């Protein structure tokens, strides 16, 4: 049985992504691994004293988020595992792909327009980089774009 | 009650000057508190600042009555002249040095250099060339419509074109807009005084000595001295204070140092003929970005409380004084020039905001169209314009200019101030409205859960038949599932709320086992600090989540 890795986070955007990963796992009769990479937001003006507490709480949040995703996937009849990693997103996802010998990586696309943060270009580049580094195909789950302001 | 207070003030004036000052202060705080209570209890549905201006205006309108003229002279004796009018030059100094300086400092403390840097281009475009262009447009319109001499009209253009940091910040804090929009509006208002003061000083020089003519080198020199000097003084004092702040951990000393810096930067810059306002802005941003980065939670709470309190007092006095200084008969006498002035500032503000934000987009920093509308309509004028207008006293033609300034300030504070909230909501930019909506969804979720619990209790007590319980229970479950399916983002919010509850429970448990002598004071304090840090951590984490949401919205 192959394994699909789904890199997910929390929030509204993550639900369609997780649903699609579950659907793919059912279609391919594959196992599913949800991975959440805890990478502190470097743009935040963090108080150094709070950094350990923030890291601890983000880890708690990631575990809780993945546990919810795990329950849903199990209810759908998928064999599922979860893993929370700390560090650079690219490196950690690559590590998980290799550890689980994944056959497919599923990631979320963006609602933002090109030229903005989290742009389509950024996701495409990330996917290409992953495919080049690991040899594993990447499926991007596109989210419904919002009308421009 | 009022009689007793006034009698005490009259008596105090004769017998104890210090007691009189204390009573003046008490009177202002009482008025401000009454207004604040009226707004908090929703008896008055007005923004706080607008209510203060209107209260001041009401006092001003009643000033013709002999008793009230006396009262006004008694309430503001240090600021009133023989006729009972608030004296211009004294009020100007009082407004700028004693009230505007700490308010600007408090606002600047919250502006982080790393955030400001990202939007420095549009802010500088609006604050420098924007104000210059607006000054000339306003000057030209007022000159052609109201017949004011061109140089004097440009002087008016300069003093009225810069948006007022005190008014803008007081409004935008209460409106709850996104961090970026607030930063754009507040950043512009904090930085645009430099160029406005330079144009004002140069134009005023030409009004006083028309034969001297315009000298570009001299103008550049004044700009460097005012703007450059002010920023330099502020940065130097800010850096010096930050050096001390990072080396000590005593909330009393740290709070005192920030207060000394707020007033000290203004005085130091003014004493070398540099811009005191820009010095305070630079000092505040520097200390807020670097000096207070690693302070203890105790100092953070103490500092926030102190500056919040000081801002409340200073804001209350500023807006009451604005209302009190405006003479309604003066406005009525100059109704037509005031109307021209209002049209001029709206036209110039519109041209400058839409052109400069368009230019900013072309240069790589795009600003959403909805933000531009708020930046246009949110350009309020206040204490700084008023103070500059008051400094014109003694100059021929100053009367109508002052009346136009009062009229424009009143229009922006009341008309624009009252309508901007509606505009923000219409454009979907109110963070408060969004949070309220999210909270309503959470409330409906909790209600659905509570209904099911109530139903289960009635079933246990045998008051509801099995079949009825089953049917109603399924229905309650469905409504919970429907809410969660329709709003998947609730899951994240619920997780955060649950975690906060868990941490507060942990905190209460710690206090309980310490009270029962199950752990030592040392262990209690260590563990408490850890839990408090985790509670504080959620502020940073939520800010990060909000920032991601805001980016999606701005895209």
Image (tube, coloured by chain):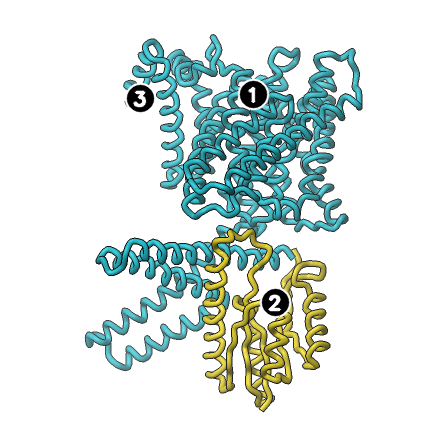
Frontmost residue, B235 versus B22:
B235
x and y, in percent, of residue B388 in the image: 60, 22
At x 43% / y 48%, what residue is drawn? B297
At horizontal 36% and vertical 72% (from top left) the residue drawn is B476
Shown in yellow, the chain is A
To which residue does mark 1 refer?
A: B331
**Picture quarter with the C terminus of chain B:** bottom right
Q: Which mark sits nearer the N-terminus, 1 or 3?
A: 3
- How many angstroms separate mark 1 from mark 3 (CA)? 30 Å
User: Distance between the Cα atoms at labels 3 and 2?
Assistant: 67 Å
Question: Residue at (74%, 51%) from the top-left corner?
Answer: B364
> SS at mark 2?
loop
Mark 2, residue position: A88
Chain letter, colour cyan in render: B
Residue placed most toward the observer, A93 or B354: A93
Can you see residue B343? no
Q: Chain of mark 1?
A: B
- Labelled disc at residue B2: 3
């Amino acid at each position: 049985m192959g394994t699909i890795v789904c890199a997910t986070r929390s929030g509204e955007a993550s639900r369609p992504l997780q649903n699609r990963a579950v659907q793919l796992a059912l279609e391919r009769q594959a196992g599913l691994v949800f991975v959440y990479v805890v990478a502190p937001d470097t743009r935040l003006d963090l108080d150094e004293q709070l950094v350990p507490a923030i890291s601890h709480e983000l880890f708690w949040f990631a575990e809780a988020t993945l546990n919810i995703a795990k329950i849903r996937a199990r209810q759908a009849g998928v064999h599922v595992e979860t893993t929370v990693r700390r560090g650079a997103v690219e490196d950690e996802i690559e590590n998980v792909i290799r550890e689980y010998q994944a056959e497919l990586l599923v990631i979320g696309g963006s609602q933002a327009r090109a030229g903005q943060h989290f742009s389509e270009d950024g996701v495409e580049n990330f996917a290409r980089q992953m495919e080049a580094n690991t040899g594993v195909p990447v499926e991007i789950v596109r989210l419904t774009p919002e009308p421009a302001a | 009650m009022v009689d007793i207070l006034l009698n005490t003030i009259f008596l105090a004036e004769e017998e104890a000057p210090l007691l009189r000052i204390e009573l003046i202060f008490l009177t202002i705080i009482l008025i401000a508190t009454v207004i604040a209570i009226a707004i908090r209890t929703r008896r008055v549905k007005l923004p706080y600042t607008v209510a203060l201006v209107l209260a001041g205006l009401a006092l001003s309108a009643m000033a013709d009555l002999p008793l009230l003229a006396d009262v006004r002279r008694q309430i503001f004796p240090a600021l009133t002249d023989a006729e009972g009018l608030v004296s211009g030059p004294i009020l100007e100094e009082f407004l700028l040095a004693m009230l505007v300086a700490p308010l600007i400092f408090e606002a600047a403390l919250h502006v982080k250099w790393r955030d400001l840097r990202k939007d420095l281009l549009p802010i500088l475009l609006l604050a420098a060339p924007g104000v210059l262009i607006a000054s000339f447009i306003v000057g030209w319109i007022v000159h052609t419509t109201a017949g004011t001499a061109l140089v004097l009209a440009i002087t008016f253009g300069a003093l009225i074109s810069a948006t007022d940091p005190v008014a803008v910040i007081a409004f935008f804090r209460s409106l709850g807009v996104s961090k970026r929009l607030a930063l754009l509006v507040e950043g512009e208002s904090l930085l645009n005084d430099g160029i406005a003061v330079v144009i004002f000083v140069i134009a005023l020089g030409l009004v006083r000595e028309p034969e001297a003519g315009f000298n570009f080198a001299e103008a550049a020199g004044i700009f460097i001295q005012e703007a450059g000097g002010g920023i330099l003084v502020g940065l130097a004092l800010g850096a010096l204070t930050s050096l001390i702040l990072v080396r000590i951990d005593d909330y009393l000393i740290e709070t005192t140092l920030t207060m000394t810096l707020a007033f000290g930067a203004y005085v130091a810059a003014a004493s070398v003929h540099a811009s005191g306002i820009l010095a305070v802005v630079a000092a505040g941003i520097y200390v807020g970005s670097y000096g207070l980065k690693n302070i203890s939670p105790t100092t953070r709470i103490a500092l926030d409380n102190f500056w919040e309190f000081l801002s409340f007092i200073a804001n209350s006095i500023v807006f009451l004084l604005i209302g009190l200084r405006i003479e309604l008969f003066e406005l009525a006498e100059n109704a037509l020039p005031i109307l021209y002035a209002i049209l001029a500032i709206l036209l110039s503000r519109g041209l400058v905001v839409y052109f400069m934000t368009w230019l900013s987009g072309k240069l790589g920093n795009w600003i959403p169209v909805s933000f531009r509308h708020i930046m246009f309509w949110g350009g309020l004028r206040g204490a700084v314009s008023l103070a500059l207008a008051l400094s014109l006293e003694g100059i021929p033609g100053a009367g109508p200019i002052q009346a136009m300034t009062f009229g424009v300030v009143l229009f922006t504070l009341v008309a624009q101030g009252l309508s901007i909230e509606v505009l923000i909501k219409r454009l979907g930019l109110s963070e408060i409205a969004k949070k309220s909506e999210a909270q309503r969804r959470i409330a409906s979720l909790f209600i659905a859960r509570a209904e099911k619990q109530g139903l289960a209790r009635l079933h246990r007590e045998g008051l509801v038949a099995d079949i009825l319980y089953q049917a109603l229970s399924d229905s309650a479950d469905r409504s919970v599932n429907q809410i969660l399916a329709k709003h998947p983002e609730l899951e994240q919010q619920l997780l955060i709320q649950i975690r906060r509850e868990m941490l507060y429970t942990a905190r209460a448990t710690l206090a309980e086992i310490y009270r029962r002598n199950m752990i030592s004071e040392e262990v209690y304090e260590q563990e408490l600090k850890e839990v408090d840090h985790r509670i504080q951590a959620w502020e940073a984490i939520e800010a990060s989540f909000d920032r991601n949401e805001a980016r999606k919205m701005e895209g």
